[in-house]
Image (cartoon, rainbow, N blue to C red):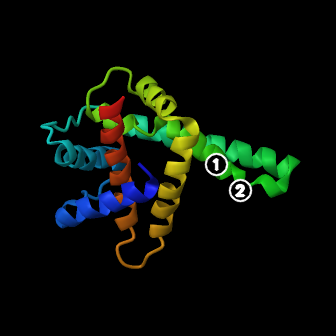
């Protein structure tokens, strides 16, 4: 599926569940995100998953984003010292590493053994280039939405749901 199809499908889905895109506002952002994802996955595939609050979502989430941001900063530093005009490529480096863990949370929610290894395997089965060309526009869509005055998280939810739709589609095909 293209990123346009994924975003269009996520808009249709969220329009059917308009009040369901809110999470509790507390400091456990990854745990609350996983709770939201569990509900959306159940809606998407008719599953009966129960949210497991004992899974270390925070640990996995912080690992994922600290690792990806470190890769971004390291590459930006290398580009800065060697070829300053290449600094925008640090964003591609960020996403290159992020896509390897793209399906980490749906896999955690599904109770898959070795979710990091499975996420990496899924990324390579889909293809690195295909995954990058799909996820970078979704990521840009999500980040730009944060600058909206009204509903700054709307694009974030749409992008997260687009990834879940993609996960369900790919999981069924792989």
* 127 or 84: nearer the viewer: 127
Q: On the picture, is 22 further left or further right than 142?
A: left
Which residue shows up at 87% across the image and 47% down it?
82
Asked if residue 150 lies left or right of residue 94, the reply is left
Q: Is residue 120 above or below residue 155?
A: above
Q: How far from the left and from the top, in percent, is residue 159?
A: 39, 56
- Most extreme residue toward the bottom is 149
Give the residue at the far right of this rendering. 82
Instruction: Indicate the secondary structure of the residue bearing disc 1.
Output: helix
Dividing the picture into quarters, in which one does residue 151 lie? bottom left
Q: Is residue 140 visible?
A: yes
Q: Residue at x 26, y 31 (%)?
A: 110
Task: Provide the residue designation for mark 1.
Answer: 92
Question: Can residue 56 be seen from the camera position used here?
Answer: no
Above or below — where is 65 with respect to 80? above
Q: Position of residue 172 (x, y in %)?
A: 29, 33
In the image, what residue occupies the spot 24% across and 57% down?
24
Q: Nearer the viewer, residue 126 or 97?
A: 126
Which labelled disc corresponds to residue 27? none
From the viewer's perspective, is residue 55 above or below residue 114?
A: below
Total numbered labels: 2
Q: Which residue corresponds to mark 2? A: 88
- Residue at disc 2, secondary structure: loop
Q: Picture quarter containing residue 108?
A: top left
What is the x, y in percent for residue 155? 39, 64
Q: Is residue 3 left or right of residue 16?
A: right
User: Label 2 neighbourhood size at 10 Å, few (<14), some (14-19), many (20+)?
Assistant: few
Q: Look at 45% across and 68% down and name the residue there.
A: 145
Residue furthest top in the image = 113
Q: Is residue 50 left or right of residue 85?
A: left
Tell me whether the residue at label 2 lies in contact with that at label 1, contact meaning CB atoms closer than 8 angstroms: yes
Q: Residues within 10 Å of mark 1 (few under 14, many from 20)?
A: some
């Amino acid at each position: 599926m293209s990123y346009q199809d994924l975003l269009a499908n996520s808009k249709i889905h969220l329009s059917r569940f308009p009040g369901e895109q809110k999470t509790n506002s507390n400091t456990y952002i990854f745990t609350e995100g996983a709770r939201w994802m569990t509900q959306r996955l159940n809606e998407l595939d008719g599953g009966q998953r129960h949210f497991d609050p004992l899974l270390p979502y925070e640990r996995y989430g912080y690992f994922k984003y600290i690792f990806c941001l470190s890769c971004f900063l390291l590459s930006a530093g290398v580009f800065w010292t060697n070829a300053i005009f290449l600094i925008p490529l640090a964003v591609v480096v960020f996403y290159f590493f992020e896509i390897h863990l793209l399906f980490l949370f749906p896999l955690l929610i599904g109770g898959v053994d070795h979710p990091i290894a499975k996420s990496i395997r899924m990324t390579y089965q889909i293809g690195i280039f295909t995954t990058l060309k799909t996820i970078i526009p979704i990521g840009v869509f999500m980040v730009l939405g944060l600058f909206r005055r009204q509903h700054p998280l709307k694009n974030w939810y749409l992008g997260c749901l687009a990834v879940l739709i993609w996960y369900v589609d790919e999981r069924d095909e792989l």
